[in-house]
Image (cartoon, helix red, strand yellow):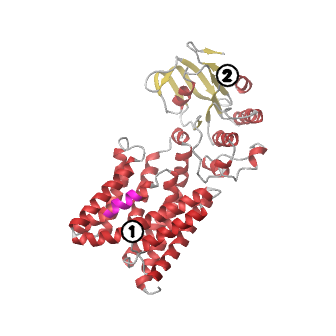
Amino acid sequence: MWSDLFLLPFLTGLCLALILPVLGCFLRLRDEWLAALAYAHVAAAGALLALVGGALPALGGMAAAALAGAGKRLFARRLAGGASFAVLLLGGWAIAVLLAANQPLAERLGHALFDGQLYFSGGAQLALVAPWAVFAGVALLLLSRHLLLARVYPDYFRARHLRAWPVMLGFDLIAALTLALATMTMGVMGGFALVFVPAWIAFRRAGSWRRGLTMAVLIGVVGYVTAFILALWLDQPFGPVLALLLIALGLVIA
Amino acid sequence: MSELLLQAKGLVAGWQRPATAPLDFTLENGQILGLTGPNGVGKTTILSALAGRSRVFSGELVLRPGLRLALQTQDVPPVDGLPLSGRELLALTEASPNGLPPWLAGRLDSRLDRLSGGQRHYLALWAILQAPADLVLLDEPTNNLDAAGVAHLVSALRERVAAGSGVMLVSHDHDFVAQVCDQIVVLRELTDVV
């Protein structure tokens, strides 16, 4: 377990296990938990497109997710009521599956992304994820008050002439890029499980927002470490083990 | 020293089309202005125009440059299922918990969705009433409040204007309006200033 072969993927996933539950709390606050699935599918499609085009899959995934996060505002009126995330999810899934079905190279990466294998991450991935997790954590802390205000007191927010779009665009980009990195590292559903389940439990059980964030991070980290050891020990793909473990935890605690 | 916060001359406001009769009023700091009248005459629309939400169709509405507004609407903050405590709600608008009634002060660390409707309403109202602002706009603040709540609100409003802010409120509660307001504007087909 402590050889580089396992240590680098473990540390990369651990960084994500710290930040994804926090992101999940903010997505749930905004009733946007479906965004996690949407950005993950778009990132998967972007990665496969990049691979087929001869570029780095990680860059393709991040570029596609960032484009989706920023671009959905252009169609905000037409895609109201969360429709943007459903459209992104369907579009991302369709492109990814078609690429995987027609390109042998894309098929292999597609399987890895959708099966949720963590063990392919190396030093380069960790060098990207670790600083990003720190940046995203600090940025979410800084945006936190305005995100909460915009949700709880939207009229107060407007009356104070606080500019909503930099906050919302900033949050969308952080969400899209974090989920793209999570998809590249632990697969579509592994990342989604860490976004959705800890926040779901925290919203049910925590007595305050601050305690909710702490609870979500604890659940994410404990679930991640346990799933990593279990998957290694049982020689199973990581993503499904993590998802089942978190679901079981959620059903008991929430 | 009194200072003019806002002035309306022949103000007609609305959403898609004009919804109010022309209206004149002024408000200085240290004053509470009440808007009353039957349903549908546009009381909330006037308040919304001050906050820049609804449109001014004609007339003049002049706000003091740099005026900081705090607006409480009739919409209940969507806190069901949200792990947000009362103390955290107040921190969001930078409102001080000092002066809260005893029946609420002891529940500040509870989740908002575990408070009664009245407690939740008063805390949401307090978060706006005590926010740093020059002009506080309140829409039907006595909704969901019992007699003790209304009495506490009256004294909190007087303290707020004594500290230098102005307050403009919309209410159907005539006793409350008569008790707390320095000026009352009744919105009708033809507007009378009482």
Is residue A28 shown left or right of residue A181?
right
The 10 Å Cα crowd at callout 1, few under 14, some 14 to 19, many 20 or more, is: many
Please, what is the three-letter code of the amino acid marked with disc 2? Gln
Which residue: 49% across, 50% down? Answer: A31
Which residue: 33% across, 56% down? Answer: A67
Extent of the magenta region: A37-44
Q: Secondary structure at mark 2?
A: strand
What residue occupies the far top of the structure in this picture? B190
| Circle 1 residue | A187
Which residue: 55% across, 18% down? Answer: B23
Which residue: 35% across, 41% down? Answer: A78
Which disc is residue B175 wearing? none
Please, what is the three-letter code of the amino acid marked with disc 1? Gly
Please tell me whether mark 1 or mark 2 is closer to you in this view. 1
Residue A178 x %, y % = 42, 63
Q: Is residue A130 magenta?
A: no
Q: Secondary structure at mark 1?
A: loop
Question: What separation in Å lies between label 1 and label 2 (alpha carbons)?
Answer: 64 Å
Chain of residue at mark 1: A
Is residue B84 shown left or right of residue B147?
left
Q: Quadrant of the C terminus of chain B?
A: top right
Chain of residue at mark 2: B
Observer-nearest of A23 and A118: A118
Residue B175 x %, y % = 73, 23
Tell me: residue B36, above or below residue A72.
above
Q: Quick check: marks 1 and 2 in contact, CB under 8 Å?
A: no
| Circle 2 residue | B183
Residue B96 x %, y % = 69, 47
- The image quadrant of residue A109 is bottom left
